Structure formats: C-alpha cells, structure tokens
Image (cartoon, rainbow, N blue to C red):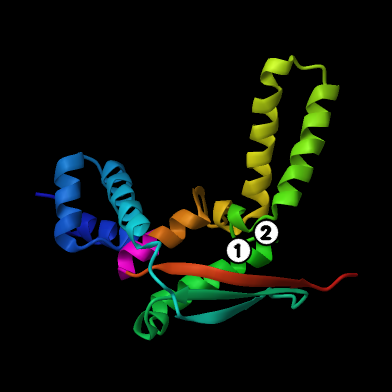
C-alpha cells in the first residue's frame, strides 16, 4: 500500500481523486510514472470536454513589479461556480503572467491568419533553398521552423514558464480534468512601456 503522504502529494500535483492516486501508485510502481499516467488520463478527459460552451469566467491582470509591463487575459469556463474558485483564479493569474513574460501574438495556431502562415512558409522556403540543402529535405526544414514559430507565437503551444516540460495547453487541460469543465483562453493583451 502506498504511503499516505505520497498519495496526498500526487493528489495535490495532479488534482486526481484519492483512490485514483492510490491505484495509479500501485499500478505504475513509481511516483513519476503515476504522475505521467494521471496526466495522460487528465488529457483524455480534457479532450472530451473541448466542445462544451464556456460562457462564464473572469478577466485577470498581471502587472510586473516595476510597473512597466503588464497583461490582461480573459479565461472562460462553463459555470460561475468554477470561475469563483481560488484555483481557477490562480490559473488565470498564471496565464496572465505567461502572457506578460513571453509576449505571444495568438491564443492558438488556429488563430494565426492563413496569409501569415503562408508568408512565413514562403520566407522559410527561400531561406532553406538558399542554404543549398537538397530538395528532398526542404519541406521538413520548413515544417520544423514553422512549428517553432507556432511554439513561440501561440500561447497554448508555449512552454509553461514555471515548468518548461509542459505546454500552456497541458496546464489548462490538467485544470479541465480537475474541474470537470471546459476551460478556454478567449483573448489577451500585453502592455509594455516603450522607452
């Protein structure tokens, strides 16, 4: 039987139920494997909820300590009950901090206008052709660089600033599994005093 403190730590980290944490520790054999298992399970739950409407939520602000940088982010969920919880407010604050720190341009890759993607693709293809690489690898080079662009400019695809092993989308999906509700970043804006 797994240690109670280990079960509690796993519950705090993943948001899964006590019995689910106990079973995961018993089945997986190690704490790290149990975390990975529960995160995968949480992502599957989140995928099932993506179609559900999100009409509640809140707008969260983050102002950096020196007052020269800040952001606003609108995070939506399904019910007012979840929107008022401290955990949801913390998530919204983390997302506002992420926006302030990284300066993304879009919420997701679906928000990037097709003409912007096509422009980047053309520019990257010209660079790749100029490098003298064989034509058989040009498309892979362009696709790889385009993926890197999405990871830098799309909030949901960025590495989470507090844990670069996870993306912002994975952070949100973990909260979807915890709350049992769909959560969506609707929009954001970032402000910086230009010197």
Task: Identify the element where label 2 is drawn.
Answer: helix
Residue 134 image point, x, y percent = 74, 14
Task: Identify the element where label 1 is drawn.
Answer: helix
Q: Is 57 displayed left or right of 150 in the figure?
A: left
Q: Nearer the viewer, residue 2 or 76?
A: 76
Magenta residue span: 174-180
Residue 89 image point, x, y percent = 46, 78
Mainly helix, strand or loop, the magenta region? helix
Number of dots carrying numbers: 2
Residue 76 image point, x, y percent = 48, 75
Taking the view exactly as shown, the residue that stands out farthest to the left is 1
Which residue is depicted at the point 79% across and 44% down? 119
Q: Is 148 placed above or below 157 here?
A: above
Residue 96 image point, x, y percent = 59, 71
Which residue is depicted at the point 26% across and 46% down? 34
Q: Does the CB distance between marks 1 and 2 fall below 8 Å?
A: yes
Q: Quadrant of residue 171?
A: bottom left
Q: Classify 10 Å Cα crowding around label 2: few (below 14), some (14-19), many (20 and above).
A: some
Q: Quadrant of residue 21?
A: bottom left
Residue 143 belongs to the span the image colors magenta: no
Q: Nearer the viewer, residue 186 or 8?
A: 186
Task: Indicate the quadrant containing the C terminus: top left, top right, bottom left or bottom right.
Answer: bottom right
Which residue is depicted at the point 36% across and 79% down? 82
Disc 1 versus disc 2: distance between alpha carbons? Answer: 6 Å
Give the residue number, with chain letter if any, for mark 2: 102
Q: Is 129 displayed left or right of 175 in the figure?
A: right
Q: Classify 10 Å Cα crowding around label 1: few (below 14), some (14-19), many (20 and above).
A: many
Give the residue number, with chain letter if any, for mark 1: 98
Which residue is depicted at the point 14% across and 59% down? 19
Q: Is 156 placed above or below 92 here?
A: above
Q: Nearer the viewer, residue 188 or 11?
A: 188
């Amino acid at each position: 039987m797994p240690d109670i403190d280990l079960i509690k730590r796993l519950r705090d980290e993943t948001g899964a139920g006590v019995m689910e944490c106990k079973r995961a520790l018993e089945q997986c054999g190690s704490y790290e494997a149990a975390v990975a298992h529960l995160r995968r399970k949480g992502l599957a739950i989140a995928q099932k909820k993506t179609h559900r409407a999100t009409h509640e939520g809140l707008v969260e602000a983050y102002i950096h300590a020196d007052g020269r940088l800040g952001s606003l982010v609108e995070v939506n969920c399904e019910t007012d009950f979840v929107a008022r919880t401290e955990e949801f407010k913390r998530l919204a604050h983390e997302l506002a901090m992420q926006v302030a720190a990284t300066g993304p341009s879009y919420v997701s890759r679906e928000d990037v206008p097709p003409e912007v993607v096509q422009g980047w693709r053309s520019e990257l293809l010209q660079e790749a052709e100029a490098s003298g690489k064989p034509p058989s690898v040009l498309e892979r080079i362009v696709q790889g660089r385009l993926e890197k662009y999405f990871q830098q400019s799309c909030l949901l695809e960025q590495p989470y600033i507090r844990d670069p092993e996870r993306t912002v989308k994975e952070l949100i999906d973990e909260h979807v599994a915890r709350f049992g509700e769909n959560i969506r970043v609707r929009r954001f804006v970032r402000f910086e005093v230009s010197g």
